[in-house]
Structures are given as C-alpha cells and as structure tokens.
Image (cartoon, grey):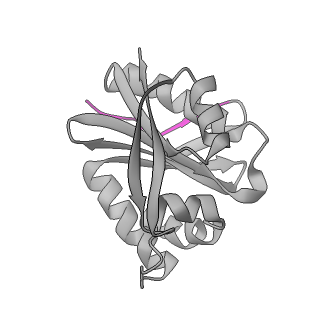
C-alpha cells in the first residue's frame, strides 16, 4: 500500500507536508476550533516546534498533505493509521474557509485513498464544530457513534462525533 506524493483538484494541489512547512502551518493555525482539536493549553512548545513534533508523528503513522491554492498554503490534511483503522483529519486556515476548499481537498483525498489504501475510512470532530460535520456528511461520511472525550484545551468533557465512509 502506498499513497502518492502529490495530487490535485481543479483549484487545489496537495503534496506531502515537509518539516519546512511547519513555520507556515503554525501561522495558519489561528483559531479556537483548531486549537481545541490539536493543542493543549498547557503545551509549552511553540507552535512551530509543536508542528515539527506533530508532523513527525503523522509521517511515522500515515501521511500528511499540505493544501495549496496556487502557491499559497491554506491548510493540511492527514491520514493516520491508529488502533487498526485509517482516520482522516483536515483543517483550512480561517481566512480561506467557506470557499469549498475543505470539501474539495477532503473529497479528492478520499478518492485517492480508496484507489490506493483501503475500503474504510474514519473521521471524528467535536460536536461544536458544525462546519466540519457538514463537510464530512457532504463527502459521504455517516455518523456511527457519539462519545464524551476530555478536551485539554477547555479542560472539560465534550461530545465527539465519529464518522465512517466505505468505498
């Protein structure tokens, strides 16, 4: 099983994320929803160091792709093999949302995933992340579970929604 180094859509190009992208990604990582999903309040690492550590983990367990619109890095998408399942996650920088980029990048990545890796893919998001829920459902994901998970960022239990899609 392998995954291509790069692929594209009508408006976007996706290529494997490199450590050099960490600085740019950390600057794009600019709002509460993304921090809620990825960072801990107590995390003493700078965002740049956090992204280097994050990308190392992703690359050891799957694939990370930088999402470009033209020459501008606008987000990131990752495929991670964890606990016997392939999971997908994604984010688009705050200033580039509501333009269809998340749906476009996610739907193309799912297509390439099904061609190269497996027939099942899973995703999760916080219940409060309505835009992500909408994108997952528009891409064909079905909600199969709801759970309570502790958020380090908010320091409280929050509802997570879990999705799956089959080829």
State whether residue 132 appears in this view: yes
In the displayed structure image, the side of residue 85 where residue 122 appears, left or right: right
- Residue furthest to the top in view is 167
Left/right of residue 105 with respect to residue 161 in the rendered view = right
Quadrant in which residue 30 is drawn: bottom right
Return the x and y of residue 162 as percentages of the image width and height: 43, 35
Q: 29 or 62, which lies in front? A: 29
Q: Is residue 83 left or right of residue 131?
A: left
User: Which residue is more in the foreground, 85 or 59?
Assistant: 85
Question: Is residue 17 among the parts visible in the rendering?
Answer: no
The answer to whether residue 32 is above or below residue 128 is below
Residue shown at 63% from the left, 72% from the top: 27
The quadrant of the rendering that contains the N terminus is top left
Residue ID at (66%, 65%): 31
Place residue 116 in its image quadrant: top left
Q: Position of residue 163 (x, y in %)?
A: 45, 30
Quadrant in which the C terminus appears: top left
Q: Residue furthest left?
A: 84
Was residue 133 drawn as part of the magenta stretch in this picture? Answer: no
Q: Residue at x 48, y 82 (%)?
A: 46
Q: Which sits in the foreground, 4 or 43?
A: 43
What segment carries the magenta color? 1-9
Quadrant housing residue 144:
top left
- What percent of the width, then of the height, locates residue 23? 55, 73
Question: Which percent across, then down, holds residue 9?
Answer: 64, 31
- Placement of 82 over or under 24, stated as above or below: above
Could you tell whether 15 is left or right of 167 in the image? right
Magenta highlight: main SS = loop
- 7 inside magenta stretch: yes
């Amino acid at each position: 099983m392998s995954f291509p180094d790069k692929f594209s859509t009508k408006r976007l190009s996706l290529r494997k994320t490199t450590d050099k992208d960490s600085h740019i990604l950390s600057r794009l990582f600019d709002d509460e929803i993304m921090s809620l999903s990825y960072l801990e309040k107590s995390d003493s690492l700078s965002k740049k160091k956090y992204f280097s550590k994050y990308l190392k983990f992703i690359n050891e367990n799957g694939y990370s792709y930088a999402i470009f619109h033209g020459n501008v890095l606008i987000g990131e998408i990752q495929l991670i093999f964890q606990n016997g399942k392939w999971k997908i996650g994604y984010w688009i920088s705050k200033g580039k949302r509501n333009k269809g980029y998340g749906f476009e990048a996610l739907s193309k990545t799912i297509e390439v995933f099904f061609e190269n890796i497996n027939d099942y893919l899973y995703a999760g998001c916080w219940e409060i992340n309505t835009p992500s829920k909408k994108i997952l459902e528009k891409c064909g994901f079905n909600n199969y579970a709801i759970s309570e998970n502790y958020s380090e960022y908010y320091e409280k239990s929050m509802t997570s929604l879990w999705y799956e899609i089959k080829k």
